[in-house]
Amino acid sequence: MSTGTASHQTALERGRAIIAQINPGLEAALAGKYDAYFPDFAETLVEFAYGRLYAREGLDLKTRQIATVAALTALGGQTGPQLRVNLEHALAAGASRRELLEVILQMSVYGGMPAAINGMNVAMQLFEEQDAASA
């Protein structure tokens, strides 16, 4: 999918198109978890994060997802659930497992070795679960 922003599409439509590519059930999952307490949270996230930021020109979707994995890794262990989701998104956007592990290791310089180890653990658990599911 191109990351260009078509003028005839709204940010929400662009965000939904990106979500359809990398995680088709994301908006519904977010709505089910958060919308009762935070009305329209899922739609707002899809519109802003994906429709306004991820859809921008200048970086392809794979690169944006790799940058997201790097940032979440450097932020440390408290970001584990979001890191896992974004690892899945990065894989769906075309990143390889090797690329993601290298990005996580690189973050040991910027977020510290504990942050990188936490990131490696999240990635390894995800990869093991994916391998088991496909066996």
Image (cartoon, rainbow, N blue to C red):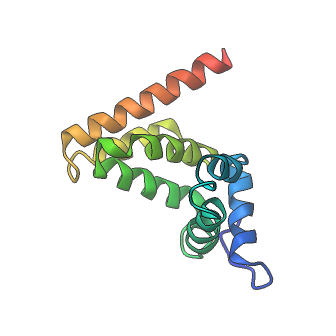
Q: Please say if 127 is above or below 3.
A: above
Residue drawn at x 61%, y 47% is 94
| Residue at left offset 72%, top offset 53% | 21
70 left or right, relative to 24: left
* Residue 11 seen in this snapshot: yes
Please state the horizontal and vertical placement of residue 4, each as a whole percent of the image. 68, 75
Residue positioned most to the front = 37
Judged left or right of residue 67, residue 3 is: right
Please identify the residue farthest to the bottom as the structure is shown. 7
Rendering coords of residue 62 (x, y %): 56, 56
Task: Look at the image and tell me whether residue 99 can be seen.
Answer: no
The image shows residue 112, relative to residue 14, as above or below, that is above
- Image point 39% across, 40% down: which residue? 80
- Residue 37 sits in which quadrant? bottom right
Q: How many marks?
A: 0
Q: Quadrant of residue 59?
A: bottom right
Determine the image quadrant of residue 114.
top left
Residue 42: x percent and y percent? Answer: 63, 59
Q: Quadrant of the C terminus?
A: top right
Which of the two residues, 31 or 50, is positioned nearer the viewer here?
31
Q: Assign the N terminus to one quadrant of the image.
A: bottom right
Left or right, 111 with respect to 135, comes to: left
Residue 10 percent coordinates (x, y): 74, 78
Residue lying farthest right? Answer: 8
Query: In terms of depth relative to the viewer, which is nearer, 18 or 106?
Result: 18
Residue 2 appears left or right of 44: right
Residue at coordinates 30% horizontally, 41% vertically from top-left?
77
